[in-house]
Image (cartoon, helix red, strand yellow):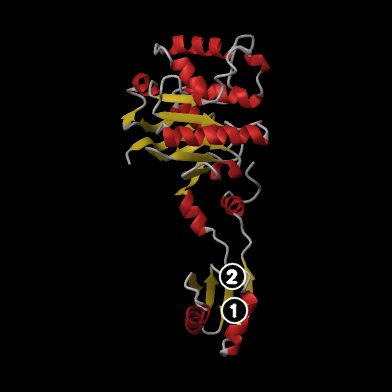
Amino acid sequence: MSSIIRTTNLTKLYGTKAVVDDLNVHVMQGQIYGFLGRNGAGKTTTIRMLLGLIKPTHGEIEIFGESLYTRQKEILRRIGSMVEHSGFYENLTARENLLINAKLMGVHKRNALADALEIVGLQHETSKRVGQYSMGMKQRLGIARAILHHPELLILDEPTNGLDPIGIKEIRKLITSLASERKITVLISSHILSEVEQLADYIGIIHEGKLLEEVSYEELRVRNRNYMEFKVSNDNKAAILLEQQCGIVDYEVHDEGHIRVYSQIGQQGRINQLFVEHGIEVSKITVSEDRLEDYFVKLIGGGTIG
């Protein structure tokens, strides 16, 4: 996979306050990259720098393998975006709004408007004034505007903000289809973990302007699986019993004398009895109840995401 976005020590200062602080983000082609952090963590400031809307204090931005500073006009032609509010003329129809944007963007393809409206599921709502649209419909229209010119990269800032559950589901389905069917690389920012984890292949976690972690979602799931942990007097003998008597192979000796078992959750009583019957002293049993959300809360040092 080739690199689509790469930032190097990207920093934005307002006075002496670093809103974005030495940020090194890597988005690869074909990914849905979830940019996750609390409100005020620096997500929108980062996105505005990626789109050339504000200048960094220092640091580098490469998009499509080229410097944004030297090739900004050419690079931005290949990007679609929706930052904060959609900002449409509410007294005009969806088609009239998109026609204005198409002219401003230099989009002359005959069916561009109809194609974009069909992709976002608004092809039967073109005569209705945008002021009569629901919030979810406005967000979908914002995405239609962002894909009018068939971009290779789509950057969406909090696209599900303020939506009801049905609207969130519609936007989630739309983003997934744009990535899988249209082969668009997507960077989506959010403060809602449950939304990011249902969409993203890769996740970057930002807190107080700093990137705390950048990791695939699959790796996070593996790393944060539930387990039963037994503190035993003989971990080697306990491991043999797990395999031979219980058929358990998904375990690890976490620390000396501590065994974590990742399968047959809830069977700790039976396993404890097996150990005791074979002369192994069990001094402690714990069952992890951490969710992925707990992991993120620990990572940012307390509080909540959202």
Between marks 2 and 1 in the image, the one whose residue lies nearer the viewer: 1
Residue type marked 2: Met
Residue in the picture at 44% in, 35% down? 179
Mark 2 or mark 1: whose residue is earlier in sequence? 2
Residue type marked 1: Ile
Compare residues 301 and 152 and report the one nearer the observer.
152
Task: Sort mark 1 into few (<14), some (14-19) or many (20+) by Cα contacts within 10 Å.
Answer: some
Residue in the picture at 52% in, 84% down? 234
- Image height of 252 relative to 16, above or below: below
User: Can you see residue 10?
Assistant: no
**To which residue does mark 2 refer?**
228
The reply to whether the C-beta atoms of the residues labelled 2 and 1 are less than 8 Å apart is yes
The answer to whether 286 appears left or right of 237 in the picture is right
- Give residue 153's position: percent from left, percent from top: 41, 30
**To which residue does mark 1 refer?**
271
- Give residue 138's position: percent from left, percent from top: 60, 22
Which disc, if any, is residue 95? none
Quarter that holds the N terminus: top left
